[in-house]
């Protein structure tokens, strides 16, 4: 039976939301959302902001700051990258029109609403489509419904780039995640999107490099047996060209699928 006490004026400095659920905590005047053990932060989700003091969501930030374009939809069957990546249509077809932007969300492509003055950053040249883009900054012109080049390569050198890979139950370990990241790269985020649960006894996954297999994300942060998105926010500088690797132990898994994403900045 529910018990409501609407006249209550205060609560303790930390309280749980549901049995074994996350906690909301007052830490020296700062509101924190923590896991049930109060040992790590938990995710907090909300709608997009509409007023000056509203909290900004990750999706809103990605779609209203300089949008980093991670690839292209060029008229054929669209690719299936990790959630959170944004692609531009370079060849019309299959229900996609030129210059449209799409963001990968929960395994599907979701159209991005274009607005006059929207800026996108092309971090790697997009060639082979009906429209081609060199590296640089582009601005959307509502009158011509086109993206206009407004800045050179130097304008995007400090923007986020990404390397991606797909992990399956029978993938050999270690798995290279995309291309080598350059010297000076600052790793800012690792995302593991488990789209199909692995059915092994205790499959594990670590993200790192040849010198430290779990440098960027430890197996304790990832549950391959449960569908979901697992995120590690960090700030690690590589002083030399480095191949990011996924160290995977199947432990008799016969099914399972995950998308891996490593984001980084180049100063």
Image: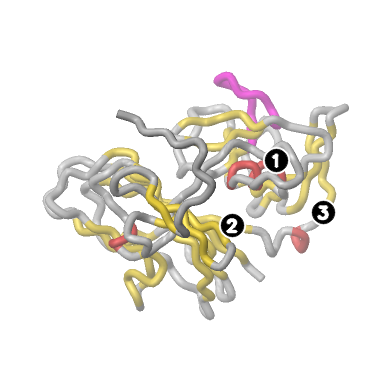
Say what secondary structure mark 1 lies in. Answer: loop
Is residue 102 depicted above or below 119 in this figure? above
Magenta residues: mostly which secondary structure?
loop
Is residue 43 depicted above or below 221 in this figure? above
Query: Can residue 158 be seen in the rendering of this structure?
Result: yes
Would you say 40 lies left or right of 59 here?
Answer: left
State the separation of the CA atoms marked 1 and 2. Answer: 19 Å
Which residue is under mark 2? Answer: 161
Say what secondary structure mark 3 lies in. Answer: strand
Measured from the top left, where is residue 187 in percent x and y? 52, 66
Dot 2 alpha-carbon crowd within 10 angstroms: few under 14, some 14 to 19, many 20 or more: many
Measured from the top left, where is residue 96 in percent x and y? 61, 24
First along the sequence among labels 1 and 2: 1
- Which one is nearer the viewer's eye here, 127 or 111? 111
- Which one is nearer the viewer's eye here, 181 or 19? 19
* Residue found farthest to the bottom: 239
Which residue is under mark 3? Answer: 151
State the separation of the CA atoms marked 2 and 3. Answer: 17 Å
Magenta range is: 88-99
Q: Which mark is residue 132?
A: 1
Dot 3 alpha-carbon crowd within 10 angstroms: few under 14, some 14 to 19, many 20 or more: some
| Front label number (1 vs 3) | 3
**Is 249 inside the magenta-drawn segment?**
no
Query: Can residue 190 be seen in the rendering of this structure?
Result: no
Dot 1 alpha-carbon crowd within 10 angstroms: few under 14, some 14 to 19, many 20 or more: few
**Is 98 inside the magenta-drawn segment?**
yes
């Amino acid at each position: 039976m529910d018990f409501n006490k609407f006249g209550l004026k205060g609560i303790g400095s930390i309280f749980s939301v549901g049995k074994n659920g996350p906690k909301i905590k007052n830490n020296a005047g700062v509101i924190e959302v923590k896991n049930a053990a109060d040992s790590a932060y938990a995710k907090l989700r909300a709608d997009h902001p509409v007023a000056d003091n509203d909290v900004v969501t990750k999706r809103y930030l990605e779609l209203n700051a300089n949008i980093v374009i991670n690839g292209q939809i060029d008229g054929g069957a669209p690719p299936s990258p990790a959630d959170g990546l944004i692609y531009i249509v370079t060849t019309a077809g299959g229900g996609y029109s030129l210059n449209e932007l799409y963001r990968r969300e929960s395994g599907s492509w979701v159209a991005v609403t274009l607005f006059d003055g929207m800026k996108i950053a092309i971090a790697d040249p997009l060639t082979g489509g009906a429209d081609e883009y060199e590296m640089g900054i582009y601005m959307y012109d509502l009158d011509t419904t086109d993206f206009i080049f407004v800045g050179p390569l130097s304008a995007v050198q400090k923007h986020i780039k990404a390397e991606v890979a797909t992990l399956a139950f029978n993938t050999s370990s270690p798995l290279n995640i995309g291309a080598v990241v350059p010297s000076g790269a600052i790793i800012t985020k690792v995302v593991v999107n488990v789209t199909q649960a692995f059915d092994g006894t205790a499959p594990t996954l670590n993200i790192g490099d040849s010198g430290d297999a779990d440098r960027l994300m430890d197996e304790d942060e990832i549950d391959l047996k449960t569908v979901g998105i697992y995120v590690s926010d960090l700030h690690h500088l590589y002083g030399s060209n480095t191949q990011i690797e996924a160290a995977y132990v199947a432990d008799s898994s016969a099914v399972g699928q995950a998308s891996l994403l490593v984001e980084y900045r180049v100063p």
